[in-house]
Amino acid sequence: ITNAENQQEVNELKEIARREVFTTSAGDFSHQLKFSDAIQRPGVAYHFESEIEEALERMHAAFRDHDFSDDGDLYNVALGFRLLRQHGYKVSC
């Protein structure tokens, strides 16, 4: 396997992640939250910076407008709160 083949496979996997995770419906933040958190921990979030920023912007608007559908899931609300605060968004508890 050559370096070019590895790079091509990495690019294909990144496109799959973009399609599967970041093109979900605007109100469904669960997958986006978990994916964003998971890729930030090992330090590979730079591959998806613009997608994460767009998702956080939509989440912030939903929090601000009280339109965040949490379905009673405290984990998702807490994760969204933490990610928004980490990225500099003003969110009150």
Image (cartoon, rainbow, N blue to C red):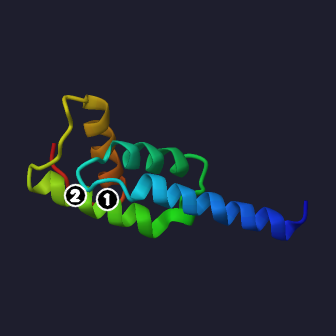
Check whether the beta carbons of the residues at disc 1 and disc 2 lie within 8 A of each other.
Answer: yes
Residue at 34% x, 66% y is 54
Q: Position of residue 26 (x, y in %)?
A: 26, 56
Amino acid beneath label 2: His
Kind of element beneath mark 1: helix
The answer to which of 12 and 60 lies nearer the viewer is: 12
Q: Is residue 59 visible?
A: yes
- Mark 1: give few (<14), some (14-19) or many (20+) Cα within 10 Å: many
The answer to which of 24 and 69 lies nearer the viewer is: 24
> Can you identify the residue that label 2 sits on?
60
Residue at 18% x, 42% y is 69
Amino acid beneath label 1: Leu
Disc number at residue 7? none
> Can you identify the residue that label 1 sits on?
56
Q: Position of residue 53 (x, y in %)?
A: 37, 65
Q: In which quadrant will I find the C terminus?
A: top left
As drawn, is 43 to the left or to the right of 92? right
Kind of element beneath mark 2: helix
Residue at 17% x, 54% y is 62
Q: In which quadrant will I find the N terminus?
A: bottom right
In the displayed orientation, state which residue is furthest to the right. Answer: 1
As drawn, is 18 to the left or to the right of 9? left
